[in-house]
């Protein structure tokens, strides 16, 4: 497996909403901000050995955070919601 695929897919996003979406063969991942849908599709298919039906991506915008008198910004990022073909599942997530 090529290491560029591991740089594209950062981590699975585990929330209550994403756990409910797994029943519909939809998995959510944090991905590189510069990755395109075709790169994400190829990385998911190579890493997990599944077939991808569709991908939806969205950018996570920066939010202002405060700790006491200090203000800062949260990290920006990108999420990918991956729909797998029927009969395919990703284990260990």
Image (cartoon, grey):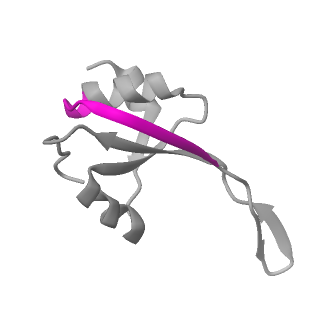
Image quadrant assignment for residue 34: top right
Q: Quadrant of the C terminus?
A: bottom left
The picture places residue 91, in percent across and down from the top left corner, at 16, 49
Relative to 54, say whether 73 is above or below.
Answer: below
Residue at 80% x, 81% y is 68
Residue at 13% x, 42% y is 87
Q: Examine the structure image and report whether residue 58 is included in the region drawn in magenta.
A: yes
Relative to 28, say whether 51 is above or below.
Answer: above
The span shown in magenta is: 47-59
| Res. 20 in view | yes
In this view, the residue in front, 35 or 52, is 52
Residue at 34% x, 43% y is 83
The picture places residue 4, in percent across and down from the top left corner, at 41, 21
Image quadrant assignment for residue 13: bottom left
From the viewer's perspective, tell me whether residue 33 is left or right of residue 91.
right
From the viewer's perspective, tell me whether residue 72 is left or right of residue 39.
right
In this view, the residue in front, 62 or 26, is 26
Q: Residue furthest top?
A: 2
Q: Quadrant of the N terminus?
A: top left
Q: Examine the structure image and report whether residue 65 is included in the region drawn in magenta.
A: no
The picture places residue 67, in percent across and down from the top left corner, at 76, 76
Residue at 18% x, 41% y is 86
Q: How many marks?
A: 0
Relative to 28, say whether 21 is above or below.
Answer: below
Q: Main secondary structure of the magenta part?
A: strand
């Amino acid at each position: 497996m090529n290491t560029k695929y591991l740089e594209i897919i950062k981590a699975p996003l585990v929330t209550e909403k994403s756990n409910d979406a797994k029943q519909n063969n939809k998995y959510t991942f944090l991905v590189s901000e510069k990755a395109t849908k075709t790169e994400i599709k190829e990385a998911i298919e190579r890493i997990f050995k599944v077939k991808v039906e569709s991908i939806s991506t969205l950018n996570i915008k920066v939010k202002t955070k405060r700790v006491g008198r200090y203000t800062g910004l949260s990290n920006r990022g990108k999420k990918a919601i991956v729909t797998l073909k029927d009969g395919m599942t990703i284990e260990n997530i």
